[in-house]
Image (tube, grey):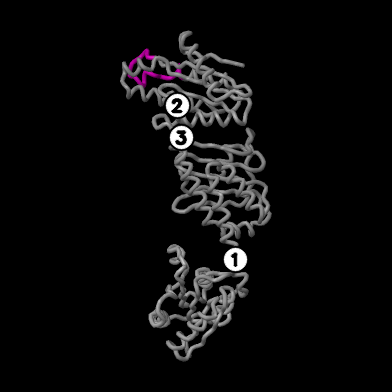
Amino acid sequence: MGKRVLIVDDSKFWRLVLGDIVREICGECELFFASNGTEGIQMALKHRPDYVLTDYNMPDLSGLYLSITLRELGCFKNTGIAILTASSDVINEFWAERSGADKFVSKMLERERMKEEIREFLSRNRSTDETETIHVSNVFQIVENRLKKEILEKEILSFLRYARDEMYVVLLLEDLFRKFVEFKGLRVLLLSPTEGRIYSLGEPVNKERLKEVLFSFLEKPTSPSSWSFQGNFSEEDKTPKSGFVHVVKETKELGCILFEEPSSEFILKNVISITQESLVTLFRNLNDFRDYIVASETDSLTGLYNKKAIMEILDRRLKVEDRTAVAMIDIDDFKRINDTFGHTKGDIVLKKVSSILRECVMNGKVGRYGGEEFMIVFEDGKGVIETMDLIMERVRGYRWEEVFGVFGIRVTVSGGVAFSRKGISTIELVELADKKLYEAKKAGKDRYFVFES
């Protein structure tokens, strides 16, 4: 029995040329023709050819697309597939390798040279399994499934343009998945060495309880240097509802998504199976971008925000909130510490004071403003005085003899606090706090003064 060859090309001229070449090479053979990619897949399903010669650029489905679709069906795993290209066709090497095609032949070759290329292709021992039943018998369903995958992947990867605003990305993910299935809440964990980020959409839950729950789904989680939380949280001991969890991982775990009480776990699993590769790409890039941002915003010695970053935080805060507060804090007599004990000990003092500030400030962000001066941007005007009192007490009470190896050495700080008012600029607010810091220094240090408008 002769070879069975399917020729797919939207040009009648090329269908005739290729048909003649195949007959010259094979003599007796079964030839089938299709004028576009969709018809090509239909003919392949109907006649099970041993070889497929397809044009690369066609109006509906490209030759690459046709090849990938056939390779997804078990009976075409050993079918010979060659893609013919014109001079204007630019083939992406990545997709060419993954198309499953055995050979690429240029239509710009002289006829005899093209004939030799096709002869070599048809000489390969290739065949199609005629016994295997294809459950997805409708070509449109095959193409539809692949198109769904491509559309969903493209949609998810488009979210990367908003990488600077992860909360918005999470909201986009929620909106996308809700197009397929309903759920009570969405909890997302993103995990990188510099920062773990937890986003909570749905009924308010306890931060630590949610963190414990999400962590429990990971086998070997990364331990981040810091944590941040955004979304709906409660001080009460409320645990998230049970549901379906998808762990996003490649060589390491990048995070996970908890869908609370989905209306159809079957549909959700199907959507996840289609999108899991793009979710890996999304999570990996979000984590990498976060690491980059943290590195660019972080003071290398203390691990706090650097001056540029903390000023930007204050600037953003003033644009959305009428009521906030800024504190400027300075280590007293720091030059004397450096001169007496050396810069190495001075660096240790800077790091320890930074650690105390980080531990005390629960309602704001801390940055190193420069030298031995620090800046705190409070999220609102609540708890500012209590936080400042705690900072002063903790710095005074630390066992500094462990740092210097000498008893009787004290380290103190002075501070200035300013509360915002409507219309105040970033620079004006910082200058007000700095003025109060200067007054605290003049009044004897180891204290803080407050400016209230």
Inspect the magenta stretch and tell me whether residue 19 lies in it. no
Give the label on residue 145, or none. 1
Q: Earlier in the sequence, mark 1 or mark 2?
A: 1
Nearer to us in this view, 3 or 198:
3
Percent x, y of residue 221: 47, 45
Q: Is residue 16 above or below residue 107?
A: below
Query: Residue 129 at what x, y percent from top left?
Result: 51, 80
Type of residue at label 2?
Arg
Quick check: can you spot residue 413?
A: yes
Mark with earlier residue (1, 3): 1
Q: Which residues are magenta?
A: 395-409
Disc 1 to disc 3, C-alpha distance: 43 Å
At label 1, the amino acid type is Asn
Q: In what quadrant of the picture does the C terminus appear?
A: top right
Check if residue 403 falls in the magenta segment: yes
Which residue is nearer to you in this view: 98 or 88?
Answer: 88
Q: Give the image location of residue 183, x and y in percent.
A: 67, 50
x, y (%) of residue 430?
A: 52, 21
Q: CA distance from mark 2 to mark 3?
A: 11 Å
* Residue nearest the viewer, comparing 225 with 15: 15
> How dense is the environment of label 1, judged by Cα within 10 Å: few (below 14), some, or many (20 and up)?
some
Residue 297's tag is 3
Residue 428 occupies quadrant: top right
- Residue to which mark 2 is pinned: 368
Residue shown at the point (32%, 22%) measured from the top left? 343
